[in-house]
Amino acid sequence: MSKLVIVESPAKAKNIKKYLGKDYDVIASMGHVRDLPSARLSVDVKNDFEPKYAIIKGKEKLVKELKEKASQSEKIYLAADPDREGEAISWHIATVLDLDLNDNNRVTFNEITKSGVKAGMAVPRKVDMDLVNAQQARRILDRLVGYKLSPFVSQKIRRGLSAGRVQSVAVRLIVDRENEIRKFVPEEYWSLDAKFIAHSRKVFKASLDSDENGKIKITSKQQSDAYLERLENANYVIDSVKKGTKQKSPVPPFITSTLQQEASKRLNFQAQRTMRIAQELYEGVDVEGFGPTGLITYMRTDSLRISEEARQQANDYILNKYGDKYLPDKPRYFKSRNNAQDGHEAIRPTMVELTPERVKGSLTTDQFKIYNMIWQRFVASLMSNCVLNTVKVSIKSIEEESDKYCIFSATGHSVKFDGFTVLYEVKEDNEEKENNLPDLNQGDNVKLKELVGNQHFTQPPARFTEASLIKTLEENGVGRPSTYATIMSTITKREYVKRQSKSLYPTELGEAMTNLLGEKFPKIVNVKYTAQMEEHLDEVDRGNEDYAIVSWRK
């Protein structure tokens, strides 16, 4: 009799089978086999919120096959993904197959490589009921809220509508931002922008910063014109030159939320697309010369921890490729967020030696783009800082009235040592481009080439993009790594939110639902309350709370 390993997907089953060999039979459950039937509440609120599960419609044949395979196997291993959802899937399968929950039959794989699978199989354990109960609490809570809200919005707004716990908060954030934009009153301000010619004949830019009375704030064309007239015949001298260096550190390797954010910004990928591709890379790709190989570690994670083995692999690569200058004197460690579950490592390549260029021919275009980002960011995160030369120059006006003067300022920076940026760099929205100023010294005279006044208006807060909304949800503790992609797809599919370019706009339907729920169910669309519920779910995960109590807190 063979040993039976049950995973979720056929691709994962195929690759694990090749690592385990002929003594093992590997079969896919295609995700959950049981759930709360949607035709009724399926939660006994009078009996400690006991859920009433049933086989998912259409999976009866698969469950029958699982039972037949199990009856012919000497040992059964439950190998769903290593997270709450995977733990719950394993528990449901164990229940359906009538397995002993005290048996050590649960195995997890942080990476689908030969060593990763062997390591996981070597330490089977019991199904973790704390993780299962955390997932059950979330599922029951969502069902209770959904069954309370959906009939209400269906009756009050439009037949067939539904509303969810976390999705409603996401829509609320988008609606609130839209209201901020509508209420925003722009304020006028002006800048005086100059071009000066240095001794070397090189032209450089500077902006008016202050005068003899201190910092300047110009709020009208009349003020701007007055300064232009005043400075028309002035001469200019370099008042001060301050030079220095600045170090720029690499960003951490990816976690789920930052991978989704960066893929949105760089590749214009929606979160669901990113996670589907990452799942493919995790489950394994047939790499030329290597065979079926999981290219990245598990992609649903909020931890920045990496293994020392992976660190050493990356260090060896950096030394061989770039030299010892590109390794920091002390190894760099990143701290995870305070509320991180820390169940897995950060998202990283399973083998640094499999560079993006080496595997490109074995990947689809989308797979290559995501793998390239993950690989580069991981390796760069362990490299030396980038060092910048900085300079700040003050240019003083010499005017007819000797007691009056204006100060223009110019800043510049150039790369002294590229460090990690030789491989990967994240550009912040407000980050200035490299700007090389000419060689300037205190006391140098410079010639004014051009001075113009430019009108500006303060801008309203930007609309959310998928990337910025995920970041806000994460910062506020709403949702968890495994939920962000579902939240994004749900609120657009239900037509509560629409995309224009990358921006998210609330629809009339989304605004109507948010306003109604805010009036009748204020807790449901309250960010802080939803974040507190996530904390309670984490406490169930840790075994510190009972899921029935969390459900009661709804």
Image (cartoon, rainbow, N blue to C red):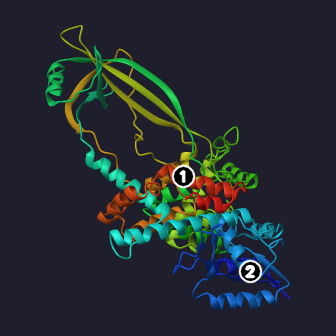
Q: Quadrant of the N terminus?
A: bottom right
Q: Residue 483 appears at what percent x and percent y?
A: 54, 63
> Measuring 37% from the left and 59% from the top, which residue is drawn there?
514
Instruction: Determine which quarter of the picture holds residue 169.
Output: bottom left
SS type, badge 1: helix
Circle 2 residues within 10 Å: few <14, some 14–19, many ≥20: some
172 relative to 91, above or below = above
Mark 2 or 1: the one toward you? 1
Q: Quadrant of the C terminus?
A: bottom right
Amino acid carrying label 2: it is: Lys
Q: Residue 98 appears at what percent x and percent y?
A: 77, 82
Q: Nearer the viewer, residue 391 or 119?
A: 119
Q: Nearer the viewer, residue 421 or 530?
A: 530
Q: CA distance from mark 2 to mark 1?
A: 40 Å
Instruction: Determine which quarter of the picture holds residue 401.
Output: top left
Query: Which residue is label 1 attached to?
Result: 531
Residue 258 visible from this viewpoint: yes
> Measuring 71% from the left and 64% from the top, which residue is drawn there?
110
Query: Which residue is label 2 attached to?
Result: 17
Q: Is residue 364 left or right of residue 317?
A: left
Amino acid carrying label 1: it is: Ala
Question: How many discs mark residues in the rendered view?
Answer: 2
Q: Of callouts 2 and 1, which one flags the residue occurring earlier in the amino acid sequence?
A: 2
Q: Residue 234 appears at what percent x and percent y?
A: 20, 17
Circle 1 residues within 10 Å: few <14, some 14–19, many ≥20: some
Q: Residue furthest front?
A: 46
